[in-house]
Structure formats: C-alpha cells, structure tokens
Image (cartoon, rainbow, N blue to C red):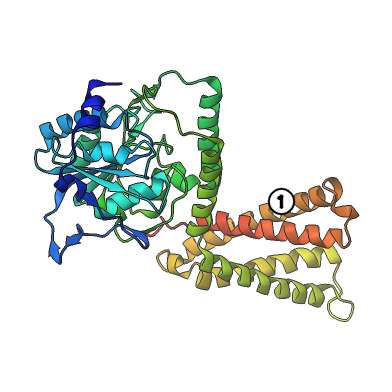
C-alpha cells in the first residue's frame, strides 16, 4: 500500500468535502453544447475536463490524481478539471477521491448508486463538465498520464478527436499473452466487418484514452453498451479531423482487471446496436418498395414478350429483356426518389449513365449471389427437408441480396461524396 493511499485513508472529512459530491445527471445521455448551469447562473467554461471512471480503484486513484494534476498544472493552470465518476465501489473509491479535494482543488467527484458501466459513467461525467474539450482516461494507471500532453497538443493543432493508440508508431502493449492479443485483434476485425465506416476510422477503436471537442458530440443522444465509449463517439459524433498518438499499454500494478467475457459480449452487442442505429432505414424502405415495383415490370414484360398470345419470343431471350427493363425501372425510381437528394448534385446524362451501368453491374452480382445463396440454403443447409423449403430459402436469399444491392449501390452508384456538378 502506497504512502499516498495511507494518508488519504486517515485524513478526516470536512463538512465541505461531505457536501462536495457532484449531483448525478439523469435522463437521456446527451452532452449539452454549453457548460451546465448552477442555480440559474452560467458557470464559466474551462479549457479541458478529464473524466476518470472508477470501480474498485482506491489503491490507484491518489497516484493518478497526483500525476495528472502535476501535468495539467504545467500546461493549463486554472483552466482544467478532473472528474472522478465512481460506481459506488465497495472499497469506497469515491470517498478516497473525495478526500483528495483539499489537496487538489481542480478535482470533482461523483458517486453513482443507480447506474453502472464505464461508458455511461464517462457520459455522465461529461454532462456535468465545464470543458470545451472533454477527455477520458482509465484509473488503473495502464494509460501513461504523460501521453495526455501529446493528445492535448493534437487538439491544439485543430483535431476534433485525439486518440491514444497502441497500434501506431510508438505504441504497443507490455506483457500481454498471446490469447489476449488474439482476442483484442479479433474484436477489432469483427468491428471492421460489422461497422467498417466507424471502426475503420482509427487504428485502435478499443482505446479508452482520448480527447474530443465538446462541439463534436454536443446534442447527440448517446446509447453506449459496455466499455468501448470511443466507438460511440465515432459513430454518433461529428468528427472530421482525427489524430492518433502512440502509447504503450502498461500492466496493472494495483487492483484487479475487470476484463471478462461479458465485456466482449457487450462489445458485439454495442456494434450491432450502432449498426442498426446508423442504418439509413427510410432510404432502405424506399429502395425495397422500388424493388417490389420491379417485380411487376419484370412479370409484365415477360408476359408480353414470351406468351404465345403476345409476341411469343423464346423464354430465355424474353427473360433477359424483362430483367433489364425491371433494372431500368428500378434505377429510374431510385435515382429520382430513393437517392434523389444525392443524384440532384450529380446532374448530367453522363453521370446518370455511369450510375445506370454501376447499378446494372451490382444487380448482376446480386443475381449471382442470389442463386449461390439459394443453392447453399436448399442443397447444403437442410432447407430441402422443410415444408416449402425452396420458397423459404428463396425469400432469405432475396432479403440478403436486397441488403447487398442497397448498401453497395449507396456506396458506389450513388456516392455521397460525389457532389460536384
């Protein structure tokens, strides 16, 4: 037990300290665009607020507060605050932190008794914070406090988000086992599959040590799950400029690790929650309705071209033409309605023709995927033994290919970034 910790245990509580706990915000997890008010009066903003979420960290918190105060006093005297948000630790971490306030007046402490979880603790801390720049650091001293200076430097250069990363130059881990390294990289790879446009923006999306401008996340309703708050910030914030700073993840000296299989499950569920939250549902529904109209176009042309009472052409030739007419129908409606807000910035027959050709190619690939998936489900995964198995398999294949067609067309045929006339 460190001398610093022994001192904090025997220091008597003053009346001021007893009443100095921050109130715990309630309601939606939304960061206000301006510092919060107190008694109807606006508090003066600060340059920086650093939140330290804790649970069972009484042995580490005195040394961490000492190091952080020393660093921040050197670059931001009288313009920062440290906010410990403790989840009612049995070892009374909140009380140990509270006893440090007389020595470190920039320190504020919140004790949560109704909520649990690192991510929500961080957001509750940010909700009471007065900083124009918000940050988070773990309390276990596995994040080197001195890296904070490099992160602040990147924010001063204009970054919206500065992330401490183990996977850039100067970064790494100290004594991780092969299994832990595999699980960490596996979790990141899974994130790239489920949520590539979010997870792929940084090299270390699992980092819990970063700074973000308040204006980049203000007004956004957060809905995190588990420990990976950075993914929530990247997914819901207006983040343009990101900088990463290398750091070496240290081994814990005091206390116990809180990493369990539950954290990995929460991480996967969080990815899925963000995936569905960020999915353009209204646009997808329009795309699906247009696709449904294409079925009638396809059937109508197939009848007109192949039926003996009409033109009586060969079935294969008629089907190819009917399918292409359905594709053209779908493209025109999608260009006008589903993606009309995008195509209105991409005028001209050349660009429209280019979009049509891409749409045709993607639909062709979708058709091939449809056939492959149908055969896989029916012939190899047991659908052949189910009542109406071929039709159930076909519906699943159609649904999967509809999602494929929509997402790839959004990214390629109607590219949001292609907005110049």
| Rendered residue at 57%/62% (across/down) | 356
Residue 299's place in the image compared with 166, above or below, is below
| Rendered residue at 55%/33% (across/down) | 186
Q: Position of residue 168 (x, y in %)?
A: 37, 28
Q: Residue furthest left?
A: 78
Q: Position of residue 155 (x, y in %)?
A: 22, 41
Residue 48, by quadrant, is top left
**Which is more toward the observer, 319 or 247?**
247
Q: Is residue 333 left or right of residue 127?
A: right
| Rendered residue at 76%/63% (across/down) | 320
Q: Quadrant of the N terminus?
A: top left
Residue identified by numbered label 1 = 369
Residue 142, by quadrant, is top left
Inspect this view and state whether residue 334 appears.
yes
Count of picture labels: 1
Residue 233's place in the image compared with 286, above or below, is above
Residue 386's place in the image compared with 180, above or below, is below
Q: Position of residue 77 (x, y in %)?
A: 9, 38
Under circle 1, the secondary element is: helix
Q: Quadrant of the C terminus?
A: bottom left
Q: Position of residue 103 (x, y in %)?
A: 13, 35
For the residue carrying disc 1, how many other residues have a C-alpha within 10 Å: few (<14), some (14-19), or many (20+)? Answer: some
């Amino acid at each position: 037990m460190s001398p610093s910790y022994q001192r904090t245990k025997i220091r008597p509580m003053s009346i001021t300290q007893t009443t100095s706990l921050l109130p715990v915000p309630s309601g939606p997890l939304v960061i206000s665009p301006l510092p919060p008010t107190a008694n109807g009066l606006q508090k003066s903003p600060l340059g920086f607020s650093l939140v330290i979420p804790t649970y069972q960290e009484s042995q580490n918190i005195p040394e961490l507060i000492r190091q952080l105060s020393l660093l921040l006093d050197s670059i931001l005297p009288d313009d920062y605050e440290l906010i410990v948000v403790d989840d009612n630790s049995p070892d009374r971490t909140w009380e140990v932190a509270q006893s440090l306030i007389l020595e470190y007046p920039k320190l504020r402490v919140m004790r949560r008794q109704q909520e649990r979880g690192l991510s929500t603790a961080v957001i509750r801390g940010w909700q009471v914070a007065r900083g124009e720049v918000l940050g988070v650091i773990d309390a276990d001293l596995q994040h080197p406090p001195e890296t904070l200076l490099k992160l602040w430097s990147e924010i001063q250069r204009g970054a919206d988000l500065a992330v401490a990363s183990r996977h850039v130059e100067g970064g790494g881990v100290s004594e991780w086992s092969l299994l832990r390294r595999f699980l960490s990289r596996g979790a990141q790879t899974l994130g790239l599959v489920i949520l590539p446009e979010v997870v792929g923006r940084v090299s270390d999306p699992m980092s819990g040590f970063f700074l973000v401008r308040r204006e980049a996340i203000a007004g956004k309703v957060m809905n995190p799950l588990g420990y990976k708050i950075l993914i929530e910030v990247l997914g819901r914030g207006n983040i343009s400029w990101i900088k990463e700073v290398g750091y070496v993840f240290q081994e814990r000296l005091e206390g116990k690790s809180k990493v369990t299989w539950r954290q990995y499950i929460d991480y996967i569920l969080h990815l899925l929650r963000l995936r569905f939250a960020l999915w353009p549902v209204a646009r997808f529904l329009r795309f699906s309705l247009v696709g449904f109209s294409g079925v009638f176009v396809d059937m109508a042309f197939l009848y007109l071209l192949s039926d003996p009472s009409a033109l009586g052409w060969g079935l294969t030739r008629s089907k190819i033409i009917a399918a292409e007419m359905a594709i053209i129908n779908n493209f025109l409606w999608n260009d006008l309605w589903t993606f009309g807000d995008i195509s209105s910035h991409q005028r001209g027959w050349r660009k429209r023709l280019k979009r049509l050709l891409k749409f045709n190619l993607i639909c062709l690939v979708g058709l091939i995927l449809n056939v492959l998936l149908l055969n896989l489900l029916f012939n190899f995964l047991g659908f052949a033994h189910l009542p109406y198995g071929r039709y159930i398999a076909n519906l699943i294949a159609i649904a999967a290919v509809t999602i494929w067609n929509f997402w790839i067309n959004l990214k390629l045929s109607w590219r949001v970034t292609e907005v110049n006339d």
